[in-house]
Amino acid sequence: MIAEMSGYPGPRHLLDIVDSLRMGPRQVQLIANLYDEIRASAAGLGNIIIMKEEELEDLFESGRADEPAVRKLASEIGRLRGDLRAIHLVAHLKSRELLTTEQLARYMALRQTTGLRKNEQK
């Protein structure tokens, strides 16, 4: 959410308001491609995170948990979650690069009128 509120819209949000931003067909295609790419990357990484979480759970359920194994898996999971967050945030960076200055200003105005202001977020 912080990326959006700071003027870095995500591809999904842009696809939802294509007409309002008066995007051209080439822009729409580039943003759709970015969305598909990010979605695939995030899904793949999400599956790996789930597998690592299951490994951690299995360690405890099987009684094989010890400090080195728990630390190793917890660190891996933390790194993977950070990578997942980075995928999402990089999508916002790339999306912004595809907009004109006018489109970005329009996006920010639309965000304001829909009530998504920084001070309203929890």
Image: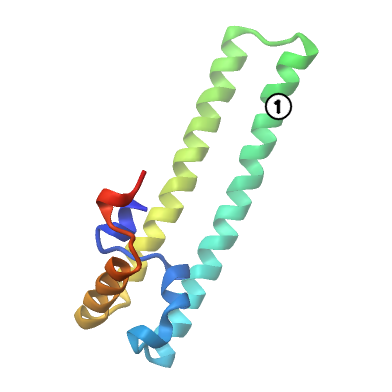
Residue 71 placement, left or right of 59? left
Measuring from the top left, give residue 102's x and y in whole percent. 21, 82
* Amino acid found under the numbered disc labelled 1: Glu
> Disc 1 marks which residue?
55
Q: How many marks?
A: 1
Q: Which residue is rendered at x = 41% and y = 88% of the image?
A: 19
Residue 120 placement, left or right of 67? left
Residue 103 placement, left or right of 60? left
Relative depth, front residue between 16 and 93: 16
Colouring scheme, one of rainbow, by chain, secondary structure, one colour = rainbow
Mark 1 nearby-residue class (10 Å; few <14, some 14–19, many ≥20): some
Which quadrant of the view contains residue 105? bottom left
Relative depth, front residue between 23 and 91: 23
Identify the image quadrant of the C terminus. top left
Measuring from the top left, give residue 63's x and y in whole percent. 76, 8
Q: Which residue is rendered at x = 56% and y = 57% of the image?
A: 41
Q: Is residue 26 above or below residue 2?
A: below
